[in-house]
Image (cartoon, rainbow, N blue to C red):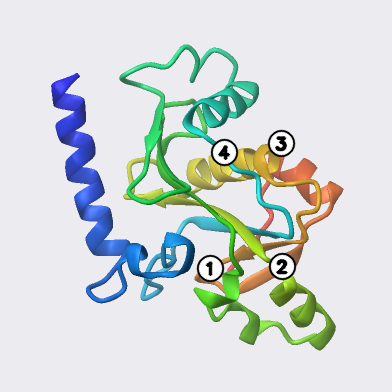
């Protein structure tokens, strides 16, 4: 137990330096929301934009993860697959050691517009779509931390989690470093849940 707490503390300390550069700590921002990862390199991350905020707790998130991966996150455990509170409100650290969906991830659940933290909307050509995307007042994201598994594993886990957690009124899916915005509909939710690739090949 002590070793795991020490490891988690070290990870969260590193996350603070990577995700929240000096002068932009999430505690100083509106809703204590995190800034997205610095985008000087491509991130394995996806963001859902919606009008509804679902206030997940540690217990409710574990239950949702257990719906996707039965018996893997419940009962709560200390190794292999676990989820703990992250460094800011609405943040959670998830460790997944699952075949085809492995890695360490940070989930953000923010009751605020994503355009306050990202310039993604500038890359949207269609003015109507841009306006609708900027009107979404909440966002939910999952970011892979480190490179402990393949990108395919990372996107598969991220997609399956977002397919399950995204509110029913989810409107768009954003890749934060590629600046790709896709309409979020039932077909896309199904593809994410199946672990299908949804981003165009480079």
Q: Residue at x 17, y 43 (%)?
A: 10
Labelled pair 4, 3 in contact (Cβ < 8 Å): no
Reading the image, the residue beneath label 4 is: 56
Q: CA distance from mark 4 to mark 2?
A: 19 Å
Question: 198 or 66: nearer the eye?
Answer: 66
Q: Secondary structure at mark 1?
A: loop
Q: Secondary structure at mark 4?
A: loop
Please tell me which of labels 4 and 2 falls first in the chain.
4
Residue 120 visible within the image = yes
Tag of residue 194: 3
Residue 33 visible within the image = no
Q: Is residue 120 above or below residue 42?
A: below
Q: CA distance from mark 4 to mark 1?
A: 22 Å
Q: Residue at x 14, y 22 (%)?
A: 2
Please tell me which of labels 2 and 1 falls first in the chain.
2
Residue 56, x across and y down, in percent: 57, 38
Reading the image, the residue beneath label 1 is: 176
Please tell me which of labels 4 and 1 falls first in the chain.
4
Q: CA distance from mark 4 to mark 3?
A: 23 Å
Position of 169 with respect to 50 (left or right) is right
Position of 24 with respect to 185 (left or right) is left
Q: Is residue 1 above or below residue 141?
A: above
Q: CA distance from mark 1 to mark 3?
A: 22 Å
């Amino acid at each position: 137990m002590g070793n795991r707490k020490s490891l988690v503390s070290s990870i969260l300390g590193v996350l603070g330096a990577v995700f929240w550069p000096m002068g932009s700590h999430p505690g100083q921002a509106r809703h204590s929301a995190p800034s997205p990862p610095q985008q000087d390199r491509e991130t394995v991350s996806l963001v859902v934009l919606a009008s509804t905020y679902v206030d997940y707790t540690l217990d409710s998130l574990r239950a949702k993860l257990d719906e996707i991966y039965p018996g893997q996150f419940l009962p709560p455990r200390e190794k292999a697959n676990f989820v703990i509170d992250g460094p800011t409100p609405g943040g959670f650290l998830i460790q997944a050691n699952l075949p085809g969906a492995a890695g360490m991830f940070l989930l953000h659940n923010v009751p605020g517009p994503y355009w306050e933290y990202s310039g993604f909307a500038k890359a949207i050509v269609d003015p109507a779509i841009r306006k609708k995307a900027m009107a979404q007042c909440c966002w939910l994201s999952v970011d892979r931390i480190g490179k402990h598994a393949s990108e395919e594993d990372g996107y598969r886990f991220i997609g399956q989690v977002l397919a399950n957690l995204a509110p029913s009124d989810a409107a768009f899916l954003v890749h934060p470093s590629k600046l790709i915005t896709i309409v979020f509909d039932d077909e896309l939710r199904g593809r994410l849940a199946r672990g299908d690739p949804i981003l165009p090949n480079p």
